[in-house]
Image: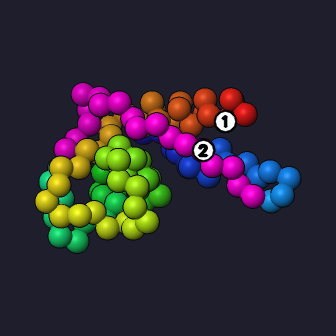
Amino acid sequence: MAVMNRYLFSTKTTNSRFETVRMAKPPVQPDDKYIISREGDRFDLLAQEFYEDVALWWLIAIANDIRVASLIVPPGIQIRIPGNLDYLGRQLEAAELDK
């Protein structure tokens, strides 16, 4: 599994602000997993369960077009867990090279 850190590719501008790296929604892959969310599910807990890394919560949120300021996942919805982390790592690297 690829090691990814969304802050690795962030750079500071001269006024000490971080630039935002926008990630596109990852394409559906054959190795993606699907679950139905339950009461109490959170993106960070799902990332720990499926990736063994709570810091990758944002991958699940982006893949499901859920861009709210909360880690809580609404219960009863289908959630896609992206399986191909190598693709997402390459996308982050490409964003860094475009700067």
The residues bearing labels 1 and 2 have C-alpha atoms spaced at a distance of 8 Å
Q: Could you tell me the amino acid type at mark 2?
A: Val
Q: In this picture, is 71 found above or below 31?
A: below
Of the residues under marks 1 and 2, which one precedes in the sequence? Answer: 2
Residue 18 can be seen in this image: yes
Q: Residue at x 60, y 44 (%)?
A: 21
Q: Residue at x 35, y 53 (%)?
A: 66
Q: Residue at x 53, y 30 (%)?
A: 90
Q: Residue at x 35, y 47 (%)?
A: 65
Pinpoint residue 8: horizontal percent, then vertical percent.
Answer: 64, 48
Pinpoint residue 69: horizontal percent, then vertical percent.
Answer: 43, 66
**SS for dot 1:** helix
Q: Could you tell me the amino acid type at mark 1?
A: Glu
Q: Nearer the viewer, mark 1 or mark 2?
A: 2
Q: How many numbered discs sit on the rendered protein?
A: 2
The residue tagged 1 is 96
Confirm or deny contact between disc 1 and disc 2 (CB under 8 A). Answer: yes
